[in-house]
Image (cartoon, helix red, strand yellow):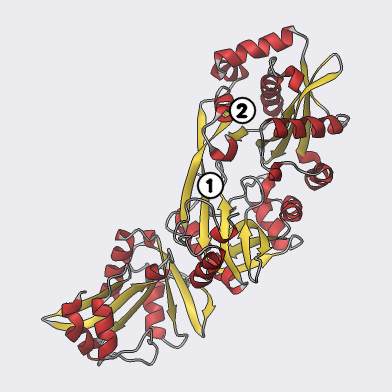
Amino acid sequence: MGPADEAILAEIFADIDETFFRPHPFTRDEAGRIAGQAGRDAYALLVEDGRPVAYGMLRGWDEGYAVPSLGIAVRTSAQGRGLGRLMMAHLHAEAGRRGATVVRLRVHPDNLRARRLYESLGYAYTGEDRGELVMLVSLELGTELPPEGDPAPPTLKGSLLDVDAPEWEAVLRAARHDFYHLPAYVALCAVQEGGQPRALCVTDEERAMLLPLVIRGIPGGGFDATSPYGYPGPVGIGTDDPAFLRVALVAGLQVLREAGIVSAFVRLHPLLNPLPPNGIGTLVRHGETVSIDLTLPIEELWVQTRLNHRRDIARAVRLGYVARMDEDWQHLEAFKHLYWATMARRSATPFYFFEDAYFDRLRDALGENLHLCVVEKDGVIAAVGLFVETNGIVQYHLSGTGDAFRTVQPTKLMMHFVRGWAKDRGNQVLHLGGGVGGDSDSLLQFKIGFSPLRHTFNTLRMVTDEPEYDRLVAARDPLLDPNARSGFFPLYRQA
C-alpha cells in the first residue's frame, strides 16, 4: 500500500465491524497515516473489482520485534465468502518473505468465527493479553485445513520454574540433556552471577521445552535473563522440531515479559541444538566447537589424532607421565592452583577466576557426574582437568597445566586418556568445546587436533519489551544503537 491508497483504505474502514477488532482508529486520518507509512510494518488490502473487501496488517517490526503481530478484518458486506482465509494466506506469505518464522495475533474470546479460522490454520493458544487470547503459528505449518476429526488446537502453557519444581526434573527425565540443564548447576551459576536460578518451561501437553536461565536485577529496576555458564540451550520433548521450538520460545517471551524481564541472552548447545531457532530474536554465530565420536573404534580415534599430537602423547608416555582419574579427589587443591595459574597466564577476564568455594559447590552440585583427571610424573602433578558425564555426553569443563610442564604438553595425554576412559564407560561423545569466546584461536586448533567433527556455537538475543530496552540503552549511553544486537548484549550492561 502507498499514499495513493488512502481513499480506498478509508472506504473499507467505514465498513469494518469494530466489535472485536480495534487495533487502531478506523478514521480517514488513520487511513492517511497508514497509506503514507514508510516503515517495515506491512498493511494489505484485498480488492475485488476495484472494491476493497478485506484488510490485513503485520505490525511490530517498526518497534523492533522479530515476531510480527497479525490482524485482519473483512468488511461487513463481504463476510462468509472465505476472504479472511485468503488474506491470512497472503499475510503468512508476506511475513515469510520478510524473514519471519512465527506470527502472533490476539483474538477476543467471544469472536468464535475468527477463532475457528485461526485454529484451522494451525494457531496454538498461549495465554491472554489485555483481555484477549494470544495465538501463535509457525509459518512452516502451511494454510491447509486439517482433516475432519482432528483434535482441538494445542494450548501452550508457559511458566518460570524454581529449582525445586517437579516439572523441571520431569522434563529432564524424559529428554536428553547435559549437566548445564541440571537445577543444582543452574543454582550454582546463579550464585556466581548474583541472580536467581529459574527455568523457562513451555508445554502443550504432549511436548515441552525447558530453558535454564539466571534472572538478574537491572540497576534502576526491572530484570533480565542470561544463560548459566556453558551451553544450556533449550531441551525437552519435541524440541528437535524447529517449528515447535520457535513457537515455544515466542510463548516463553510472553512469560518473561509478564515477569518484568526485559531481555534474554541464551547460549545454544552445539550438540543438542543443531538447528537454531531462527526468526525469534538476533541469532549470532560465534564459531565452531569440536567433539570426538566415541562410537568409533579406538584405533580410528588414534588415526584421527593429528600427527604432532600423536608424537607429543607418545613422548609424554616415554618420559614417564601417567594420566588417570582421581576418584578420591586427593588433588583437588592442586587443580585449583594450576587452574588459577593457567587463567593468569592466559590473561583471562575476572569472571574465570572462580573463587575457592566454587569448586566445592560444583562437586556438591554435580556429584558423581563430575570427574577429576590428573597427569603426573613421579607424584608431581603436571596437568589437571574437570570432565562432566551426562546422558552419554562427556564435557571438557575446566583445566590447568603447570608452567614447568608446558613444553611437554601433558594436556594432550590427558585428552587421549579421557577419550578412552569415556568410551569404555559407554558414552557416545566427548565434547571439547571451542576457542576462547568462540574464536578460532590456538585453543580451538589444539582441540581440532583430536577430531574432524565440528559444531556451530550460536547465541540468541531476545528482547521482550522493546520500549523499555530502548530506554535502558539510552540511559546507559544516548549514542548507543539499541538495534545493534550482534555484539555485546544487552547493551545497557556494557561497561
> In the rendered structure, which disc, 1 or 2, sits on the residue that comes first in sequence?
1
Residue 29 is left or right of residue 424, and the answer is left
77 and 476: which is toward the camera? 476
Give residue 115's quadrant in the image: bottom left
Callout 2: 10 Å neighbours few (<14), some, many (20+)?
A: many
Mark whose residue sits in front, 1 or 2:
1
Q: Amino acid at mark 2?
A: Leu
Q: Amino acid at mark 1?
A: Asn
Tell me how far mark 1 sits from mark 2, CA to CA.
20 Å
**Residue 404 location, x and y as percent?**
76, 18
**Residue 453 location, x and y as percent?**
52, 30
222 and 471: which is toward the camera? 471
| Quarter of the image with the C terminus in it | bottom right
Callout 1: 10 Å neighbours few (<14), some, many (20+)?
A: many
Q: Residue furthest top?
A: 318
Tell me the SS state at disc 2. Answer: loop
**Residue 224 location, x and y as percent?**
62, 63
Height in image: 207 above or below 384? below
| Quarter of the image with the N terminus in it | bottom left
Per the image, the residue denoted by label 1 is 273
Per the image, the residue denoted by label 2 is 294
Q: Which residue occupies 78% across, 25% down?
A: 374
